[in-house]
Amino acid sequence: MTRHHPLPRPAAAPWHRPRRGATTVAVALLVAACAAPALASPPPPRPAPPTPTATALAASPATTDAGAHVQHGRGALRSVTPLSRLSRDEVARAVAGHGVDVSSVRHGIATYRFEYATITPTGAPTTASALLTLPDGGDRALSTVAELHGTVSHRDDAPSVGANVTRLGAYLYAAGGRATVAPDYLGLGTGPGTHPYMDTASSVSASLDALRAARTAAARLGRALTGEVHVTGFSQGGQVAMGLGRALAHGADRHLRLRSLTPVSGPYDLAGQELPAIFDGRVADGSAVFYLAYFLTAQNRLHHLYDDPREVFRQPYADRMETLFDGEHSDEDVARDLSATVDALLTEEWAARLQHPTGALAEVIARVDGVCEWRPRVPVRLHTAAGDRDVPTGNTASCASELRRRGAHPEVVQHGDVDHLRSYLGALSDNARWLAQRG
């Protein structure tokens, strides 16, 4: 993968990496993105003019802007950095360059990176970063779209740092008149450490704290966020979206109210759908290898699944894992140093264990699964595609079935025989129109 040019100039998608041979594959463990066309190329975005409210904000107290105490300083704003401004026409050209419907685009946008206080998977204080995108015009008081991104391995490919396709949804939803918050997750963007890939709890807590900090950031930029939150996300972000929606619905923050859930092609069921699909060929080889390697390496850092990578991975791959997934290697670099097939990657013991998980591995998978085991009382639209060979559509069917069993009424939006990324592009068009109709 090449470095990404700023939107809206031509850019390689952050989830796009070459496949062994010639084909392209998505990048997201048990949930990533695929090949992406280059963006349209209007003039480069203009820098957002520095203002006293937008530059180098001092560390804020551990409170929300409504004055409520935030436990352990979570959600406290640390800084805001202006990034760029795009006119309405520039946004429309960038979005249209991906074949996404631009009928909802009504405003130009301004983008900002903000850093904030949150917690690690073990509850220790840390910091993370996120992208805040505001409409240039429209109402002063804005509802918010939480846009959760798919898998990336390099920290600079996260939304607040990589001005690339991870920002496409943020641009579109903000241009439609809502604030958009796109968390980078832990260990990506400007946050310290490595990314705890597919650790649902920490992705949700970091995203929740990003929404808290965004309220303070927006207020200092002259806008007010109403606390009404529409949650969406793609691939890994689809799974995080269901978890974040559950947290909001269960009262995680009294200032934030869930209004809708529209996740796209998420790996909601590793045990019942995604892992079986990896081993029976429904997930493409290159994607399966990337996802498993990332997942096992990240989860072992948290839960000690094995003592030595050589127990799990064949050589020469075993000796590379910790370095490959250090947050400093691009998806392309990682893919180049991995095997072509799952059989060539895994030892026989671990190939068997992943197909029949027990013990600590089964507990880890159970922590990841379960995001659909609740009853949303807001509109839910689950996007999927029959042609997806990264996160097969059975994941969405499983989630919808679980939600219905608990009394919810999700709508499944089927995008047909298209690949993983194109399920996302179709969902962007659909979600933007749907949100516009809701006012």
Image (cartoon, rainbow, N blue to C red):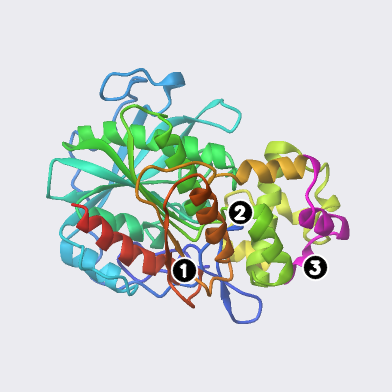
Badge 2, how many Cα within 10 Å: few under 14, some, many 20+? Answer: many
> What is the x, y in percent for residue 265?
49, 61
| Disc number placed over residue 431 in the picture, else none | none
In this rendering, the label closer to the viewer, 1 or 2? 2
> What is the x, y in percent for residue 9?
32, 68
Q: Amino acid at mark 2?
A: Asp
Image quadrant assignment for residue 104? bottom left
Secondary structure found at label 2: loop
> What is the x, y in percent for residue 37?
41, 75
Does 273 sit above or below residue 60?
below
Secondary structure found at label 1: helix
297 on left or right of 102: right
Does 372 sit above or below residue 9?
above
Q: Which residue is mark 3?
A: 344
Q: Which residue is mark 1?
A: 421
Disc 1 to disc 2: CB gap under 8 Å:
no
* Residue 349 painted magenta: yes
Numbered range of the magenta stretch = 337-359
In this rendering, the label closer to the viewer, 2 or 3? 2
Labels 2 and 3: the sequence-earlier one? 2
Identify the residue at image location x=56%, y=25%. Answer: 124
Q: Which residue is mark 2?
A: 269
Count of picture labels: 3
Q: Amino acid at mark 3?
A: Ala
Badge 1, how many Cα within 10 Å: few under 14, some, many 20+? Answer: many
